[in-house]
Image (cartoon, helix red, strand yellow):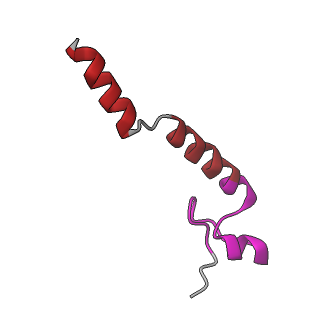
Amino acid sequence: MIIETCNRCNRKLKTSKSIHVGMGPVCKRKQAEADAEFEKRQVTIYEVLEYTEKSKR
């Protein structure tokens, strides 16, 4: 099923490339920035374990 509205802002997509991607170029850039910020803030289980070990001392 082809959706012709942006997955991020729900505006109508105009180009076939945008329709294929599912969002326009501006929303795609904003989503990439948001995803990068989300990834940057993630904590790994190893970091949690290391912190737990340090706090026990």
Q: 50 or 39: which is nearer to us? A: 50
Q: Which residue lies furthest to the left in this view?
A: 56
Asked if one can make out residue 15 in the rendered structure from this viewpoint, the answer is no
Quadrant of the rendered image containing residue 49: top left
Q: 42 or 49: which is nearer to us? A: 49
Asked if one can make out residue 6 in the rendered structure from this viewpoint, the answer is yes
Q: Give the range drawn in magenta.
A: 5-28
> Residue 24: x, y in percent?
71, 62
* x 41%, y 35%: residue: 43
Q: 47 or 37: which is nearer to us? A: 47
* x 34%, y 26%: residue: 50
Q: Is 21 inside the magenta-drawn segment?
A: yes
Quadrant of the rendered image containing residue 40: top right
* x 56%, y 59%: residue: 8
Quadrant of the rendered image containing residue 5: bottom right
Left or right relative to 47: residue 32: right
Left or right relative to 39: residue 48: left
> Residue 56: x, y in percent?
20, 16
* x 63%, y 65%: residue: 11
> Residue 53: x, y in percent?
27, 22
Q: Is 47 inside the magenta-drawn segment?
A: no
Q: Which residue lies furthest to the top in this view?
A: 57
